[in-house]
Amino acid sequence: MVASTTANKTTAVKPAPTPQRSKWRTVAAFVSCQLVAILFVEFVLCLAGLGEEEIFKFDSTIGFRHMPSKRVTWRTEGFAQSNLDADGMREPGLTIAKPPDTYRVAVLGDSMVEGFQVPVEQTFGALAAKELSPIDGKQVQVLNFGTSGYSTAQEYLQLKRQVFKYKPDLVLLCYNSRDVFENWSPPDQVITNVRPAAVHLPGSYLFIDSSPVVRWLKTPRAKFLQATEWFRQNSRIYGLFSAVDLEMSQKNLWYRAFINAITSPKRAITEFKTAWSAQQQQGPAFQIKFFEDNTGKTKAAAPAATPAAPIATTVAAPSNATSPAATESQHVFNSAASNESLSKTPPLTAAQADQQHVFNSAASNDALKPSTVEVSKVALASPSKTPLSADPAAPNSMYRQLIQRTLNSLFTEMRKESAANGAGFAVMSLPVRSQLCPLIGMETSFGGIDYAQELDGVQQICATESIPYLNIEKAAETLPLQQRESLFYVVHLAPAGQEFIARAVTPFLRQQLTNK
């Protein structure tokens, strides 16, 4: 008998498959966690008031201006919190329309006037306004239009674009060290050096050229900063990195050379050479830049062949101007620069007059390639009929006369514009640390010209043009050394400095407003 067995078949039950996460869900979760972390850091920085020193918005005409509707917490020197309004102004509750029975004083200047280092109520303008009010039954408002890095040319443009809409009764221009040089300073990697150029050639008009700004805004660095403008305006994390970038770009030549290597490789070689030279000399390198040609090279004044030979500026005409406007503007520049037309200047078009005779120098207008700016030894009589020196620091040098003439024209135009808008115009020179109590390693002169020499020129202009002038630098020189030092944090004004200026300027402002 054959036994047969039946094998029991056991069926294994497989567990249900575990659904796998989509890789996109994983990425989304990761990104969400990062965003939460970033927002948390932003919140902490907001509570701490860190990363809130990014204050500049780029402008193709004037270079840059204050960001609108921006909270600023300043920690670089001193400490103060401010809220810029929609027009970039710092005064709380300020309206564009002038209140009735009010005198308004508009104060223009650079970071020394801006005064982010102290609360707005401790700035010399606010202190003076409090002391002045009332005058003839009217309250006095002092409006602070100070902007870090501004040249006199930028202040002139700001006066026409922004200041006059506030209907000031008096415009007070504050002169600071090196302002006269900054009207010719070409833009570089430092944001506060992005400026238009201004020059007044003999026998010509005052020209203000914004094309250096336009060219700079086309650089990779500028494009990046413009593309990230929302983050610059709103992100405090970005603000921390930006503060480091600004500090390094202002004080570290090697860092500037590195940035140039990324944004402008051709220029980077020159920057690295400058940094190396400065290190070898154990001090900052200085080079006077007159104009830049279209290759970025600097052309300086050539020394005269003989002491009696006067010097003139001549301009090579462009071989292919690309537009009628550029051709006409270049014709004006050529005519002003040539010695054949020193006694007369061709009339400008209405558009040029409205733009305040835009200076289309070959140095900064791409449309005029391949024109150049050169200095030759043809006869061009100086106002004093004396030989011009090849030393830029000499009082009779072409360089000194050009920058002085340019500053003179800017003051004159600002006075005329102010009068046309029903406002008086006055100039005040600010105290500077490099002159009163310099720190170790601080430069006390610029290109062989110190602040005292600058102010001699300012005083001469004001006397010639009948512009009221107050020299606070001279008043500060009478203080003991310890009191001089108390006026400043490092470079900018401390509360004691603001109070000192307020005490000095109050009677001056009272006199100007009373005489109005």
Image: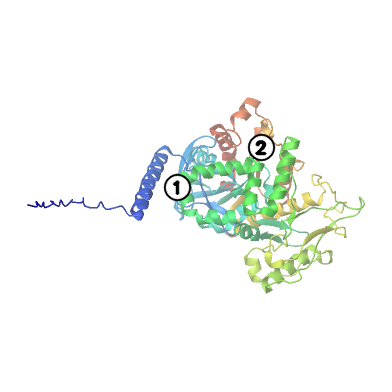
- Amino acid identity at mark 1: Ser
Verify CB contact (< 8 Å) between mark 2 and mark 1.
no
Q: How far across and how far down the image is residue 513, in percent?
A: 56, 47
Question: Given this view, does label 2 or label 1 mark the residue nearer the observer?
Answer: 1
Look at label 2 and name its amino acid.
Answer: Glu
Residue found at the far front of this picture: 1
Residue 5 rendering spot, x and y as whole percentages? 11, 51
| Residue 322 located left or right of residue 148 | right
Does residue 443 appear in the picture of this structure?
yes
| Figure quadrant of residue 38 | top left
Q: Say which residue appears at 62% left-offset and 25% top-offset.
A: 482
Residue 445 visible in image: no
Tag count in the figure?
A: 2
Identify which residue, 381 or 25, lies in the foreground.
Answer: 25
- Per the rendering, the mark at residue 473 is 2
Q: Which circle's residue, 2 or 1, is located before the other in the chain?
A: 1
Residue 270 vertical position relative to residue 422 in the rendered view, above or below: above
Left or right side of 205 for 503: left
The colour scheme used to paint the residues is rainbow
Label 2 neighbourhood size at 10 Å, few (<14), some (14-19), many (20+)? many
The secondary element bearing badge 2 is classed as: helix
- The image quarter containing residue 217 is bottom right
Residue holding disc 1: 235
Q: Secondary structure at mark 1?
A: loop
Determine the image quadrant of residue 376.
Answer: bottom right
x, y (%) of residue 266?
Answer: 70, 54
State the CA–CA distance, disc 2 to disc 1.
39 Å
Q: Which residue is outermost to the left?
A: 1
The disc placed on residue 24 is none
Tell me which residue sits at (69%, 32%) in the image: 441
